[in-house]
Amino acid sequence: MGAGLSTLFYTRNDPGITDWDVSFLNPSNLDAPPVARGLIILNQPFSRDLLDTLWNVCSWHCCADGGANRVFDLIPDDLRCSWDRRYVPDLIKGDLDSLRTDVRDYYISKGVPIIQDQDQNSTDLMKCVQSIQELEKPEYLTVTQYEIIILGGLGGRLDQTVHTLSYLHKLRRTRKKAFVVTDDNIAWVLDEGQHRIRIDHDILGPTCGLLPVGVESTILTTTGLRWNLTEAESSLDGLVSTSNHLVPGEFFVTINTSRPIWWCVELQKD
């Protein structure tokens, strides 16, 4: 099937298919429909360019504890001394064991609420998601549900990465869209069923993968990949589709999975 024909076929509305579009990662895309998004910034390294991109497409911004240090350290000195509200989050929340004193003082001077939550049964990420859920209560609700973008969470300590994988695997039950973004890739959970992912080759690829994390196994069928799968069983004990590739000229990837699975795709470095 040629690229043009596949594009025509897969852009039909189908209520049985979940559509995914991460064009918010492309700063030059001015035609993306407005979507209410909440940004949660974790305490891991990221670039100023990526912070700018994600900050600008989100209407609510939250730093998870030491994530505020990361943002603060990227603010130019002249901007810190101005009245500019860029990089001023709506909330800083966590157990606050990582938040530096100079960062705390700066954001207090900017009027940012700083909430210490010492609940040992929840991580800083979970505490920030709880704050988004509070915003979605009927008395505060301005949107049906925020899309959540998590900056960080797939690098650094392995236990923290596994927590991110586990938490979003469970979060899929209550949230329609939640993404994890680093300078290297974007990833999210595809629940069981059929999915159609719009591919912007200016920002995505070429490498991608389907990771059966959190399930014993799943049955996968795909189109739009260099090495497609047809009714293939995937598990950590068997086949794992890593280092797969997007196909130039193909603008959709479709995935049919019998169980939830992680999809990840590389971000273009330029």
Image: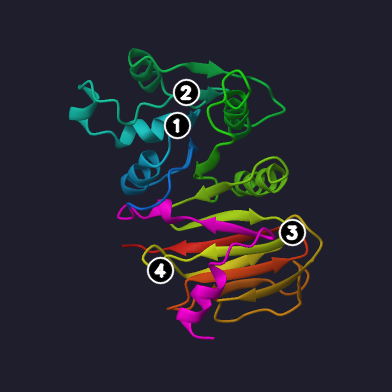
Distance in Å between CA atoms under marks 1 and 3: 30 Å
Which residue is identified by label 4? 201
Q: Is residue 22 magenta?
A: yes
Q: Which mark is residue 91?
A: 2
According to the picture, the residue beneath numbered tag 3 turns out to be 192
> Looking at numbered disc 3 in the image, what kind of residue is underneath it?
Glu
Query: What span is in magenta?
Result: 1-29
Whichever of labels 1 and 4 marks the residue nearer the N terminus, that label is 1
Residue 61's disc is 1
Compare residues 96 and 190 and report the one nearer the observer.
Answer: 190
**Residue 136 at x, y = what percent?**
60, 27
Dot 3, how many residues are within 10 Å of its Cα: few (below 14), some (14-19), or many (20+)?
some
Q: As drawn, is 241 to the left or to the right of 85? A: right
Say which amino acid is labelled 2.
Answer: Leu
The tag earlier along the polypeptide, 4 or 3, is 3
The answer to whether 14 appears left or right of 186 in the picture is: right
Name the residue type under label 4: His
